[in-house]
Amino acid sequence: MWSADEVHFQQHGSRCRMWVPPEIKDPVLLHHPTRDSVGYFGAVRLRDGKFVFQREDVVFNSETFFPFLKKLRQASCHSGRRVVVLLDNAKYHHGSLHEDWRTRAMPDFAVDFLRPYSPELNPIERVWKLTRRKATHNQYFPTLGDGAEGVEEVFEPWQTGNETLRRLCAVI
């Protein structure tokens, strides 16, 4: 069983707090006004914590989700077991672009959808929270690429299976 979802990691402009002499009525403090983000599709295998991810620079839609779904099937088919992927009800997860492919793959690779508006039921949400804490929390990244590198450094060791992710995503 796999849990899959997508996430954005944002780069915000930095702000600071400082003392200003009282004679300066309106200090001008310039900061970098960015609100860029980098997105990732990700899936974690609940049995052993193996993590599969794919960076998405453009937009989350049916065309960009389909290659990730194929990549996930490729990564999960080696066990010889039936694979079930838990997804939320994003419109592009139900896309007609990959509906035939999902139907053909159904015996070995099934997609189940969580009920609407229930992100707390998707275990991968915990992975996103841990990633933010380890890679982006209280960190300054001068460029979006630097932020993406920090996130991917956290993702890399998780690709072979991880006890931390297994425990974090355990369905009790």
Image (tube, helix red, strand yellow):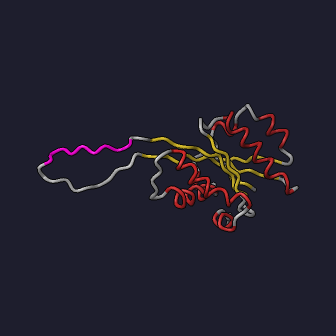
Query: In front: 98, or 159?
Result: 159
User: Quadrant where the C terminus lies?
Assistant: bottom right
Q: Residue furthest top?
A: 97
Position in image of residue 75 (x %, y %): 79, 51
- Which SS does the magenta portion mostly show? loop
Give the residue at x 83% y 44%. 106
Position in image of residue 138 (x %, y %): 44, 58
Position in image of residue 40 (x %, y %): 62, 46
Give the residue at x 70% y 34%. 95
Find out whether residue 37 is within the magenta segment: no
Residue 44 falls in image quadrant: bottom right
Position in image of residue 112 (x %, y %): 73, 48
Q: Which residues are magenta?
A: 24-32
User: Quadrant where the N terminus lies?
Assistant: bottom right
Residue 58, compared with residue 88, is above or below; it is above
Residue 46 falls in image quadrant: bottom right
Give the residue at x 40% y 45%. 13
Residue 1, compared with residue 27, is above or below; it is below
Query: In front: 151, or 73?
Result: 151
